[in-house]
Amino acid sequence: MRTPIISWFFEQKFAEEGHYNQSILLELCQVIPVETLNKVFLELIRHHDILRLNYDKEMDCLYYNNEHLNTESFIHVINLEGGSINHILEVINTDIRHHFDMKNNLLIRPYLLVSEEGCYLYMTAHHLVIDGVSWRILLEDIVTLLTQIQNEQTLSLPEKTISYDYYAEKYNDWASKRIIDINYWNSILSTKNSLVCHNKGHSTYADTVKVEIQLSQDMTDKLLGRANEPYHTRPNELLLIAMVQAVNQVFSINEIVLELESHGRDVIESVNANRTTGWFTNIYPIQLNINASDLQVQIKSLKEQIRAGVRRGYEYGILKYLQRQKIQNKKMICFNYLGEYKEKQNDYFTLKQLMFDCNMSEKNQIPYLLDVNAVVLDKRCNMTLKFDKNEFDSNHIEKFTHCFEKELKKDIRALCCFKGENFYTNGF
């Protein structure tokens, strides 16, 4: 039984379905024997059933493959010629196999990268079995297991809150009881976005241009804290508001429909998925209007529009992928805030890099016009913007990137300077 996001994935009909991954790089603080890492991964795969997932394309069937529990060696060892981060990233891009045989391979693949300067653990996993929250769970479990092995204890992980297949069953049952107004969604998707500069049609990940923005630690602190006090906003809302302001300025658009991603684990309030690994992402369109020139009014209005759209977001996936209603398909700007990755100190590793937006086959068609991902790592907010260069020329890419950063910093500074009498106390 499939969830909306799983159905979304297969409906994209990617040219290389086996290469649509998320990855993570850890720097090891001590030498960890390969045998120890193999024990850790065997227990992870035994405990988290979704990691044993496979897909039979001919049968169009997802299934758990318990043959993976008979695997003796999970760790692939690569000896590095140098220990610089640039060399490591080059090796990851050129020497590591990211494509999965979805019918036969284990859909998570760990590599031990060894150099004279130090060791790294690189893990790549197909998105079908992982998401941003799942990585946090796996990292906590790896620390737990390494500690137990070091202390010669029996390997034991906290129980899953719910298995993924049971969650999918509960979700489908819950969704079948929802009454959803299709006219609401058709109205949103009928809005015309005149963002596209070239409109060349088919584009793949090879046609993307990647630009990065990084806030200072001070600006990030304000984004996460003080800037939210005047209007009780959240960091993801301030990021989204600045992005909409940039669209308004660069493309002269007052009304925009874009696509939001959220972690999706809170859709069913009665189901606890806090310790369940898998892909729970919720994707849905949202319509936002800039209908005021005054910054304070603009921020308050956009915050309320965002929350109104988010409250109904779950409906879209149910309508399109479970009830199979015919809804217009269109490429949009996609926005995803992954939150703050606060690493719990441990004796075994530090988090070096999150690679959530760069591990897709270049042959796969891109499902967006512009993909914006933001995450706070090492106390700094990092934003990655991936443009379809067949749709945007270099001038618009440079102008939008600059404007997005400028608007975000302007909003943060203004919000941090608001006085008490300017606080808007209604509609918390």
Image: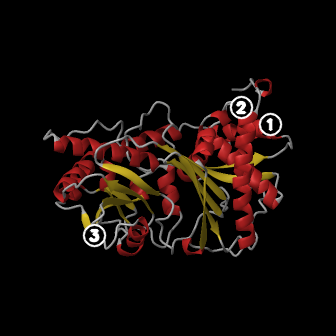
Q: Is residue 71 above or below residue 226?
A: below
Q: Position of residue 153 (x, y in %)?
A: 14, 38
How crowded pointer 3 is (Cα within 10 Å; few <14, some 14-19, many 20+) is rated as: some
Colour convention: secondary structure
Task: Tell me if 254 is positioned left or right of 308 in this view.
Answer: right
Q: Residue at x 40, y 45 (%)?
A: 136
CB within 8 Å, label 2 to label 1:
yes
Which marked residue is nearer to the observer: mark 2 or mark 3? 3
Q: Position of residue 36 (x, y in %)?
A: 18, 53
Instruction: Report the residue marked by disc 2.
Output: 231
Q: Position of residue 300 (x, y in %)?
A: 76, 35
Q: Quick one: label 1 or label 3, which is nearer the N terminus?
A: 3
Local SS, label 2? loop
Q: Is residue 54 above or below residue 364?
A: above
Local SS, label 3? strand
Residue nearest the viewer, comparing 122 with 252:
122
Q: CA gap, disc 2 to disc 1?
A: 9 Å
Q: What label does residue 78 carry, if any?
A: 3
Q: Quick one: label 2 or label 1, which is nearer the N terminus?
A: 2
Q: CA gap, disc 1 to disc 3?
A: 54 Å
Residue at the extreme left: 152
Instruction: Report the residue marked by disc 1.
Output: 296
Q: Position of residue 331 (x, y in %)?
A: 66, 62
Task: Tell me if 5 is positioned left or right of 349 in this view.
Answer: right
Q: Quadrant of residue 66?
A: bottom left
How crowded pointer 1 is (Cα within 10 Å; few <14, some 14-19, many 20+) is rated as: some
**Total marks placed:** 3
Instruction: Give the residue type at disc 1.
Output: Gln
Q: Quadrant of residue 311?
A: top right
